[in-house]
Image (cartoon, rainbow, N blue to C red):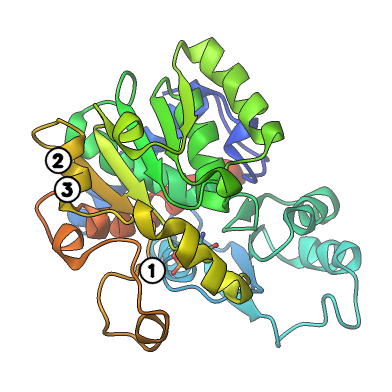
Amino acid sequence: MTASLRGRHFLSLEDFSGEEINYLLQLSTEFKRLKQAGLRPKNLEGKNIALIFEKPSTRTRCAFVCACHDEGAHPEYLGKDDIQVGKKETMEDTARVLGRMFDGIGFRGYKHETVETLARFSGVPVWNGLTDKHHPTQVLADFLTIIEHFGTLNGLSFAYVGDGRNNMANSLMVGCAKMGMDFRIISPKELFPSQEIVDISMNFAKDSRSGILITEEIEKGVKGADVIYTDVWMSMGEEAETKKRIKLLKPYQVNLEMMKKTGKENPIFLHCLPAFHNNNTEVSREIGEMEVTNEVFESKFSKVFDEAENRLHTIKAVMVSTIGAR
Ligand code: CP
Ligand code: NVA
């Protein structure tokens, strides 16, 4: 294990070296083992943690809350209607107030600049639990799941299929490039990632001697992939785009035929969740289309619930290491 991450914010994987990401993954593995053994080390005894959530969440919120309880900290959930921020108070002022009371702050919201402001003004570690631009705590859980399955990250091929310019695509591209994984985005041209994030990731890929491919062609993109990843076609806040997105993304649905096109015997399927994979939710019935077939979602390839569980262990590692308890 390596250098201390004490006092650092966790806003984007751009700010962390491959070695530091590996450290967080090793710590996550250790916390998972302890939890499975029924042990709660209480590294955060007596700490207070604020959780500001502008958007809804199941996994991220619960991972923060359960990690706090396991480690002896007190979590305070601040939903969009609970505090004045954005209405009667600026984020600068809110950050300075919360920083006087709390030892760390988790944030989920819209603009990435908001979490950056929170980090700049609070004086305590701030953790990004999703913005429109990045979702780095999710990527740590994705990486832990891949390591559990393949024993490594370096040298594997990762194919992200679908909306190539959303928070997951951005964070996975940065993360895979840092960790030496061959990364592909397979999406329609209209949904290719921004040149800015591609250039940033290309530089990391050069350092880790890996590659990045952005393509519209499914066969070319998924060939040789060890991991097929997708996400919802409309991220939170993009509901008005539904009609347009379905038209663009329908050919990019993950199905068994696509899994076979990898040419690999045992590729894995990952999805950050929540996923549309059957018609058993209000919204999936309304939309009538799914980014992944139920057949793949429920198949032996799918590791999505290991991945969801790993949100807990990885978020715990981020909180404990940046608060400086490990
Ligand atoms: N994957 C993820 O972030 O899930 P939630 O939106 O439920 O937190
Ligand atoms: N891209 C999705 C991720 C959800 C975890 C969204 O932002 O809604």
Q: Is residue 288 placed above or below 102 in the rendered structure?
A: below
Amino acid marked by disc 3: Glu
CB contact under 8 Å: marks 1 and 3: no
Q: Secondary structure at mark 1?
A: loop
Badge 1 or badge 3: first in the primary sequence: 3
Amino acid marked by disc 2: Lys
Ligand 1 within 8 Å of the CB at mark 1:
yes
Q: Which quarter of the rendered picture does the N terminus lie within?
A: top left
Mark 3 surroundings within 10 Å by alpha-carbon count, few (fewer than 14), some (14 through 19), many (20 or more): few
Query: How many discs appear?
Result: 3
Q: Secondary structure at mark 3?
A: helix
Mark 2 surroundings within 10 Å by alpha-carbon count, few (fewer than 14), some (14 through 19), many (20 or more): some
Residue drawn 62% across the image and 18% down it: 203
Q: Is residue 305 left or right of residue 50?
A: left
Looking at the picture, how far across and down is residue 185, in whole percent?
45, 37
Q: Nearer the viewer, residue 59 or 228?
A: 228
Point out which mark residue 274 bears.
Answer: 1
Q: CA distance from mark 1 to mark 3?
A: 23 Å
- Circle 3 is placed at which residue position? 257
Q: Is residue 290 left or right of residue 298?
A: right
Q: Nearer the viewer, residue 30 or 243?
A: 243
Badge 2 or badge 1: first in the primary sequence: 2
Q: Nearer the viewer, residue 165 or 315?
A: 165
Query: Is residue 79 something one can see in this rendering?
Result: yes
CB contact under 8 Å: marks 3 and 2: yes
- Circle 2 is placed at which residue position? 260
Residue drawn 14% across the image and 40% down it: 260
Query: Is residue 319 something one can see in this rendering?
Result: no
The picture quadrant for ligand 1 comes to bottom left
